[in-house]
Image (cartoon, coloured by chain):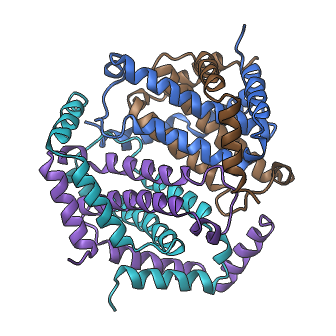
Chain colours: A purple, B cyan, C blue, D brown
Amino acid sequence: MTNNLGELQDRYLAFIADRGWEEFHTPKNLTMAISVEASELAELYQWQDNVPVEQILEDDDLRERSREELADVMIYCLSMANELDIDVEEAIADKLDQNEARFDSETADKIARDLSQWQR
Amino acid sequence: MTNNLGELQDRYLAFIADRGWEEFHTPKNLTMAISVEASELAELYQWQDNVPVEQILEDDDLRERSREELADVMIYCLSMANELDIDVEEAIADKLDQNEARFDSETADKIARDLSQWQR
Amino acid sequence: MTNNLGELQDRYLAFIADRGWEEFHTPKNLTMAISVEASELAELYQWQDNVPVEQILEDDDLRERSREELADVMIYCLSMANELDIDVEEAIADKLDQNEARFDSETADKIARDLSQWQR
Amino acid sequence: MTNNLGELQDRYLAFIADRGWEEFHTPKNLTMAISVEASELAELYQWQDNVPVEQILEDDDLRERSREELADVMIYCLSMANELDIDVEEAIADKLDQNEARFDSETADKIARDLSQWQR
């Protein structure tokens, strides 16, 4: 069984339809759901210092919980994309196009320089 | 040029590396970025009533801005997944497995019934 | 015992100091805590339609849970204000000054008109 | 002119009523507004390392922007409290009572110990 995004999206839609939950999945509600799940992910790191990823990866439990919360965020993103008839991969590619044009080397250097004073 | 998730992830990684921004992409910072972008998406719907998706789809500008904010959320999700060495499609599939088991028909009916009193 | 904001702030500071938790209360961490608690408040309303406050007030349990989450948001706001040596009431008064000047009657009418198309 | 919370709350209510915006200030919408403003505060610290407050206080601009975003969060909290007829100071005091009982010295020590491995 492959798991491409389109198939996962269809599977989630069937899950919602089977349970009679479609009426709750309005765009407004879905933006709240995405934001709430994003906060559940952030909560895992809330009181930690800004440690490097290598230290996170040593903690299997934290990694697993992050994986689950990240999945929740993305599931609601897929549901929102489905509601608005958005092709997720295409939307991401278009945004990367924009970012690559917007952050030219001069702008990027300035940002890195400004941020460097806030690193330890 | 195809745009599967793995390729988009690689493209974003190159974008960050080219700009010398890797040091800022710690797990903690990325959870904040995901949450901040999720709020930018929610902000578009903040003062709207909970209107059906059909009405949203009539507004090309709102749909386009939603598409961009959704892409931002997902780009940071892909970056987080990359940091933690998480296969996004697999994580989503595993979470759907869990949800399908957890929300059996009795539980789902109870949720729908509880929520029905809060609908108009 | 009175409960003005300054006293509540001092009481919270003593609570944190007694438990040896000061080192975790950095500005960055506190912004995450405020945001996480704000999401816990939003979560209570996530799947509800946008019902009028009168209906909410009939549900004692929802009102009580909202009261607790709102208190959590404000406690972390007071802690952040304390860290940054901000007088909360003065900061609010200054922001209200700004808003009153910024949203003159013409601007306010335009906003209400734009939003009216998104109400039911 | 004094600025106690009750007076600020009344002033904000008049601001909203004068502009005909009351209908938008439902509990659901206000939870979104609180969350969106909380994210605007977090955004200021998003790419910074977890630096001590002393360094933040050297940057007048960052402190001022934090003060404004914090005021926005609290203004919407006051508005929500007003809608739900919640006495803010009392709600905070009750939550501090709960926290003081819940986090006894043993529990607090365990939390500090667990978090210490995530500090640098």
Q: What percent of the width, then of the height, locates residue B44?
A: 41, 51
Extreme-top residue of the structure: C1
In this picture, residue D120 sits left or right of residue A82: right
Quadrant location of the C terminus of chain A?
bottom right
Quadrant of res A51 = bottom right
In this picture, residue D98 sits left or right of residue D80: right
Can I make out residue B59 in this image? no
Q: What percent of the width, then of the height, locates residue B50?
A: 29, 41
Residue at 36% x, 67% y: name it. Answer: B91
Quadrant location of the N terminus of chain A?
bottom left
Quadrant of res C119 = top left
From the viewer's side, name the closer residue of C73 and A71.
A71
Quadrant of res C101 = top right
Can I make out residue A14 in this image? yes
Residue at 78% x, 25% y: name it. Answer: C10
From the viewer's side, name the closer residue of B72 and B68.
B72
* On screen, residue A42 above or below B79: above
Residue at 57% x, 57% y: name it. Answer: B32
